[in-house]
């Protein structure tokens, strides 16, 4: 893009000011806006709304003091969940631009929501994340919902279009289904509590009235209209229900917290009724097929029984022959039994003979004789060992006695010597060991002598 900076502060300058075309000027202004305002969010009131056949929306967004033109092209406005009207307060997200053909400054809208929807959407996403983290949306908690129920409960408004749509579908597809309405407000401040109470009442009465599944829903509406089904209390009531629940809230594009928590989601109340009711013609066709199959199996059983009876009848035409055959079989069996018995007895006799021989060789009397002979042999061996040991011991004692006699002081005493002790019993080996007047005892070969020392004599006296 070519950019011109026009300086008007010095008009007397000799510098030549470039001349722009209107298209160039609008193109430059458009570039400046789009580059400096890439994305903005604006709140205001809708006015001068135009919806031509092209599918684009053109409107003026205004507040108390100002206004701006807006354009929302068909590819974008298809995602808007409400139909804007003059006077609506809306929030538009988009970018600033200029329509070069007229030089109109305008807002190109990417998304549009009614005032208040933004806060509701943020609360929706926050609660969705919380319950998802707690596992309320996990597949393992989902109960199975079948396509054929005898008794279905419906939690919705008693005066709304949803209950009429549901009844119409069941009446067309499978009128035998029993429908019980648990009425509840589906919009407004009281709606969440009434929906919770209705679900709890259905569960409380389940054993008594036999409700097999619940449809919880309403027709379409704005995010604010559907807010009751985005409440945490409703989500937890659905999760805690022992009765399988099919959510059917709004239109196909609407998703609520109840849809994520329910066991099955249907895009509309009518679709929920379609899912939970078999087509009666298909049902009758299935019954007809079952009946035909049952008749076929019954005919086959009867045919087999008939063939069996005919065979038995043929067998009974000559009962005497059958008796003869049985008699021969009895004779054959008797011979086989006798032969088997004889062989068995012969085998047992051989076994007994072998066992008897073994017992005789190991009889108590034989064992006693063997043990007695062994005892006698051992006794003789022990006696010889004892005698030999005694003789050996005697020889050792004689030798030791001789050795002792050779060094025994008694033998020395027998040759005239004596051993002298003092009065304390200590051997006196020198004369100086005693004093005159000391009492001494002399040990002779036979007997002892007690005496008193008169004097001490030296060795040479």
Image (tube, helix red, strand yellow):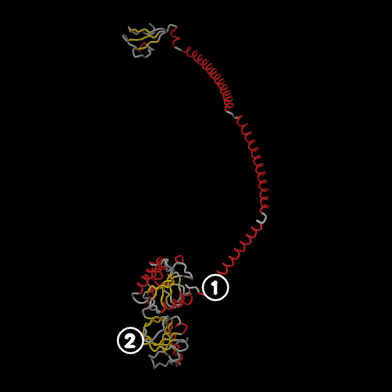
Q: Secondary structure at mark 1?
A: helix
Circle 2 residue: 64
The quadrant where residue 120 appears: bottom left
Q: Residue at x 42, y 93 (%)?
A: 14
Q: Residue at x 53, y 71 (%)?
A: 287
Q: Nearer the viewer, residue 345 or 404?
A: 345
Using the image, determine if residue 337 lies above or below residue 245.
Answer: above
The reply to whether discs 2 and 1 touch (Cβ–Cβ < 8 Å) is no
- Near mark 2 (Cα within 10 A), the count class, few <14, some 14-19 or many ≥20, is few
Using the image, determine if residue 102 lies above or below residue 125.
Answer: below
Classify residue 285 as left or right of residue 162: right
- Near mark 1 (Cα within 10 A), the count class, few <14, some 14-19 or many ≥20, is few
Q: Earlier in the sequence, mark 2 or mark 1?
A: 2
Q: Nearer the viewer, residue 97 or 460?
A: 97
Q: Gap in Å between the C-alphas at discs 2 and 1?
A: 68 Å
Tag nearer the camera, 2 or 1: 1
Residue 388 placement (x, y as % from top left): 55, 18
Q: Secondary structure at mark 2?
A: loop
Q: Which mark is residue 285?
A: 1
Q: Residue at x 33, y 87 (%)?
A: 65
The quadrant where residue 301 appears: bottom right
């Amino acid at each position: 893009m070519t950019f011109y900076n026009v300086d008007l502060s010095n008009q007397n300058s000799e510098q030549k000011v470039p001349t722009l075309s209107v298209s160039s000027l609008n193109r430059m202004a458009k570039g400046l806006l789009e580059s400096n305002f890439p994305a903005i969010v604006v709140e205001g009131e809708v006015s001068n709304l135009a919806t031509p056949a092209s599918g684009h929306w053109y409107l003026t967004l205004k507040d108390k003091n100002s206004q701006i033109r807006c354009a929302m092209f068909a590819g974008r406005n298809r995602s808007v969940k409400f139909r804007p009207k003059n006077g609506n307060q809306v929030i538009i997200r988009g970018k600033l631009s200029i329509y070069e053909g007229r030089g109109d400054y305008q807002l190109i809208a990417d998304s549009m929501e009614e005032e208040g929807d933004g806060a509701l959407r943020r609360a929706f996403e926050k609660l969705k994340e919380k319950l998802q983290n707690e596992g309320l949306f996990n597949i393992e908690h989902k109960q199975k919902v079948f396509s054929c129920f005898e008794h279905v409960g419906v939690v919705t408004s008693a005066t709304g279009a949803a209950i009429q749509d549901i009844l119409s579908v069941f009446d067309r597809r499978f009128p035998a289904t029993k429908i019980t309405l648990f009425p509840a407000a589906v919009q407004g401040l009281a709606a969440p509590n009434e929906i919770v109470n209705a679900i709890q009442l259905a569960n409380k009465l389940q054993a008594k009235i036999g409700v097999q599944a619940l449809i919880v829903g309403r027709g379409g509406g704005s995010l604010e209209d559907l807010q009751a089904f985005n409440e945490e209390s409703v989500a937890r009531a659905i999760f805690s229900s022992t009765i399988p629940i099919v959510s059917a809230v709004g239109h196909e594009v609407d998703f609520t917290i109840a849809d994520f928590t329910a066991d099955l989601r249907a895009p509309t109340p009518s679709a929920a009724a379609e899912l939970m009711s078999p087509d009666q013609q298909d049902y009758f066709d299935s019954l007809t097929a079952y009946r035909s199959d049952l008749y076929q199996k019954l005919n086959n059983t009867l045919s087999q029984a008939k063939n069996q009876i005919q065979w038995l009848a043929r067998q009974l035409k000559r009962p005497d022959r059958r008796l003869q055959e049985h008699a021969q079989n009895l004779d054959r069996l008797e011979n086989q039994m006798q032969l088997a018995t004889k062989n068995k007895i012969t085998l047992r006799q051989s076994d007994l003979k072998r066992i008897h021989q073994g017992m005789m060789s190991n009889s108590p009397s034989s064992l006693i004789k063997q043990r007695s002979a062994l005892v006698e042999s051992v006794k003789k061996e022990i006696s010889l060992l004892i005698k030999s040991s005694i003789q050996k011991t005697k020889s050792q004692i004689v030798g030791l006695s001789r050795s002792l006699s050779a060094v025994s002081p008694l033998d020395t005493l027998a040759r005239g010597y004596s051993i002298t002790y003092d009065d304390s019993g200590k051997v006196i080996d020198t004369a100086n060991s005693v004093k005159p007047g000391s009492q001494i005892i002399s040990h002779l070969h036979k007997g002892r002598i007690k005496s008193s020392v008169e004097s001490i004599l030296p060795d040479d006296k």
